[in-house]
Image (cartoon, helix red, strand yellow):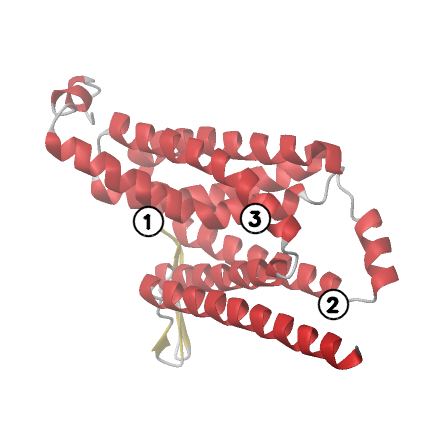
């Protein structure tokens, strides 16, 4: 492939190893794409409700197309993304910032900002929240632009994860397309679930906040940032999933406990 010969993409395509790699990649892309799906759902809520489904669907299609384009670019220019663009070495601060680290750091900062902003809107006064929602209504083009920008961040990490498993472009592209189709199916399910269970919107925003922290720690690690001799370490994926599962369990138990309290209050009032 590096020599411009297309045969390496096909020579081991129909093998058991390629099938296993395809299945692993599809599962990986689907799992890693969930935070992307969550962000797309939040952005889609900011447009006219009649256009919400269109924005979600188009956002996912953009994500699929962008991942395939980015996959091709990364395979060709992966060394350029990893090479340091700027370095600093002082007694209290060191860094070796690459293109990859900048993209991940930007994504982390933006997700944290988005999550905190939405949380503050959510806990505002009811009438102020209604006014804020009306004022914050975005055009379809504006929402899709924001989705496209954030897709670059999410896609970059998923593409690099794919490259770590295989260099076969066809296997990677097929896994991206299949995971994209699964995301389209999941998009309506996630949206309908959040509409019927609005209390879980808070959980979704804190998951987004957690993803932002994870991206910032990963970006700081990729940029080799250290302060006073203490290097920034990336949040382990196992830690992220453990915290995520804990948040979900706490939310479920709290929701059921709240229903029980309300039921007891109703009985005592009667």
- First in residue order: circle 1 vs circle 3: 3
Which label was assigned to residue 123?
2
Q: Image point 46% across, 48% down: which residue?
A: 34
Q: Disc 2 vs disc 1: which is toward the camera?
A: 2
Callout 3: SS: helix
Callout 1: SS: loop
Q: Which residue is mark 3?
A: 39
Graded by Cα atoms within 10 Å as few (under 14), some (14 to 19) or many (20 or more), the crowding at tag 2 reads few
Which label was assigned to residue 247?
none
Disc 2 versus disc 3: distance between alpha carbons? 19 Å
Q: Image point 78% across, 44% down: which residue?
A: 137
Q: Is residue 6 visible?
A: yes
- First in residue order: circle 2 vs circle 3: 3
Callout 2: SS: loop
144 horizontally vs 166: left or right: right
99 horizontally vs 184: left or right: left
Relative to 145, say whether 104 is above or below. below
Relative to 51, say whether 235 is above or below. below
261 horizontally vs 121: left or right: left
Q: Position of residue 241 (x, y in %)?
A: 38, 63
Where is the C terminus found, in terms of image quarters? bottom right
Graded by Cα atoms within 10 Å as few (under 14), some (14 to 19) or many (20 or more), the crowding at tag 3 reads many
Q: Which residue is mark 1?
A: 83
Determine contact: label 2, label 3, CB under 8 Å. Answer: no
């Amino acid at each position: 492939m590096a020599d411009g010969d297309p045969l390496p993409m096909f020579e081991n395509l129909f093998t058991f190893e390629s099938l296993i790699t395809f299945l692993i990649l599809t599962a990986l892309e689907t799992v890693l794409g969930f935070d992307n799906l969550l962000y797309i759902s939040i952005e889609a809520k900011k447009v006219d409700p009649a256009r919400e489904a269109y924005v979600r669907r188009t956002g996912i299609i953009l994500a699929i197309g962008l991942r395939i384009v980015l996959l091709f670019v990364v395979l060709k220019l992966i060394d350029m993304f990893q090479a340091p663009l700027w370095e600093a070495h002082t007694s209290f601060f060191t860094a070796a910032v690459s293109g990859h680290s900048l993209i991940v750091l930007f994504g982390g900062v933006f997700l944290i900002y988005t999550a905190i902003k939405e949380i503050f809107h959510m806990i505002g006064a009811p009438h102020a929240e209604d006014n804020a929602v009306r004022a914050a209504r975005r055009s379809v083009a504006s929402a899709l632009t924001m989705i496209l920008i954030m897709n670059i961040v999410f896609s970059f990490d998923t593409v690099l994860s794919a490259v770590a498993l295989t260099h076969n472009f066809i296997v990677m592209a097929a896994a991206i397309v299949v995971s994209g189709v699964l995301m389209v199916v999941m998009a309506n399910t996630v949206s309908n679930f959040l509409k019927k269970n609005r209390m879980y919107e808070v959980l979704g925003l804190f998951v987004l906040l957690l993803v932002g922290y994870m991206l910032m720690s990963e970006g700081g690690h990729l940029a080799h940032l250290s302060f006073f001799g203490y290097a920034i370490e990336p949040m382990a994926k196992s830690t992220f999933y453990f915290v995520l599962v804990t948040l979900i369990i706490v939310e479920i138990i709290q929701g059921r406990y709240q229903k029980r309290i309300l039921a007891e209050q109703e009985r005592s009032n009667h």
